[in-house]
Amino acid sequence: MAMKPKTHNGNGNSSDNNNNSGGGSSSSPSPPPSPPLRSSVSQCRRRVRSKAPSQLLKDSFGGGILFRRNLRYLVVLPLLYLSGLLMCVGGPFSALVGWPTTPGAVYRSHDMFRKFWPHIHSDNSSVLELSSVWKNKRRVKEQKPCPNSTASPRFESSGPSGYLIVEANGGLNQQRSAICNAVAVAGLLNAILVIPRFDFHNVWRDPSEFRDIYDEDHFIATLEGYVKVVKEVPEELMLKYENNITNVPSFHVQAWASVSYYLGEVYPVLQQQGIIRIAPFANRLAMNVPPHIQFLRCLTNYEALHFSAPISTLAKKLVNRMIEKSSRTGRKYISVHLRFEEDMVAFSCCVYDGGEAEKIEMDSVREKGWRGKFKRKDRIILPGLNRINGKCPLSPLEVGMMLRGMGFSNDTSIYLASGKIYWAERHLVPLLKMFPHLHTKESLATPDELAPFMGYSSRLAALDYTVCLFSEAFVTTQGGNFPHFLMGHRRFLYGGHAKTIIPDKRKLVVLLQDTGLSWKDFKDQMKEMLNESDRKGMMVPRVRKFNRKTSVYTHPLPECGCLQRPPNTLIIPNSTFLNYHQKSMR
């Protein structure tokens, strides 16, 4: 049965972080927010700086001329800058002074929906079949065999250098990144890795341990022969630290540390002490590492990290139920990662169609969550600029219009991976009108099945991750660790194609404010956007210089290619689940 807007909570957002949101009651808490509360950079603020012209004023005649000439710039340029900001803000001020707003700066999607709805409702022409969405295919290359060992020649004749303890922080996929990096660092330093510890943070508030999320024994067994992993530090060594692992001195490693940094700075300390603890461990290893170390990341991400039995059991049930409910579309479905929770809307500083009530509520959420950070005198909030720069979360209505414009019919089954939608009873109604076969884990699972997961955002996110992984098309709307890991995993499984729709939000917001646009023209633009996603889904970055945007987790090929398996051996044998995936790979 399709979900109902008033009971939807979409809890356990598949992203790494979410928080509670307004708009409808919920029996389960929403996962914690994506944005870190103490982030030094905000998407919605631009710092205004002024520079004193002290160097221009000289005691010479020439200095006086320079000062007078630059004084004009000091007066004119700030005025131009401020006028540009006001133009970008759009909304009430522009209307007050009679200026035209910058295209795309104002949310008018609800008006466009009212205009397009008769056409959407009656448009059954050129319906896009899910089986034919992805037309581009990568040429399969013969892969080199995986290495039998990743030991560095410098360590071949020596024993382990010591024990490595790491504390992984963040949500599900940030922790996953930290685990993969920890295995890589252990291999780099010839260390014995202690099962990573998960840092409890007041943002995500999930007390889950490694074994609650992942199959601990499978993790250890898979890495055997590459990196030795133990569940605990030997007792005789812990006696030195009064059997308290937090007494082990914490070594602070710089972000994105290089291989040379670890070998020159960390390895001597590890060798001397026999044990080292790195906390925090988020993004503490550079993406650009030697191939044998990169392989350890691949092996960990795609082979060693299997979800725990409770998670994988329910996840398979959810996938099977989505397949059963997708008989109208060849047993295939779309998954949408929707980031429209209260905290995300508040943090973005974007303005939607809620009027004064929305403004009051968002101001309250920002003050409660970020304690005056948005009221600092040197910060300017620019909702219009954020929107035209593609920084605003897509609303459920915008996602629905985009998908209908691409050609997906109202028979299409959609799995919604999200936290609790902001003002759900209002924002979900148009999406349900366009796609009545809308499902979440709450609508697919029974309350008893979900009960053990409630209150654990990472475990709930793991359910969303699995259902999205096996969808025919995955739609990402706001970025973050969740879609980046998922796109990489889908590339790994689906012959190098991410099978992911990535909206061009800069283009979309302009179209959704153009009241003169026809439904036919909008559809043509959306089909172009889908074709671009198809093209980019199979692309490999030309420059294989890994950075945060082109990491091995998002673009795993060819580095992880030796681990790929034939389609008929990819999935744990579970009738419907197995058959569906075999067919989707052909």
Image: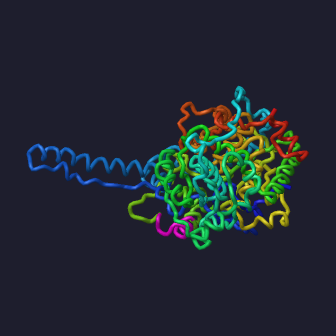
For image coordinates 65% across by 31% down, the residue present is 535
- Residue interval drawn in magenta: 362-373
For image coordinates 70% across by 26% down, the residue present is 141
Colour style of the rendered protein structure = rainbow
Identify the residue at the far right of this view: 575
Q: Residue 253 at what x, y percent from top left?
A: 49, 55
- Can residue 465 be seen from the camera position used here? yes
Along the line of sight, the residue nearer the viewer: 264 or 311: 264
| Residue 372 located within the stretch drawn in magenta | yes
- Can residue 344 be seen from the camera position used here? no
The N terminus lies in quadrant: bottom right
For image coordinates 55% across by 46% down, the residue present is 390
The C terminus lies in quadrant: top right
Q: Quadrant of residue 315?
A: bottom right
Q: Quadrant of residue 243?
A: bottom right
Q: Residue 159 at what x, y percent from top left?
A: 61, 50
Q: Is residue 354 above or below residue 581?
A: below
Specify whether 234 is left or right of 218.
left
| Residue 572 located within the stretch drawn in magenta | no
For image coordinates 55% across by 64% down, the residue present is 359
Q: Residue 565 at what x, y percent from top left?
A: 77, 36
Q: Quadrant of residue 471?
A: top right
Q: Is residue 134 above or below residue 422?
A: above
Specify whether 364 is left or right of 52.
right
Identify the residue at the far bottom of this view: 242
Specify whether 82 is left or right of 72.
right
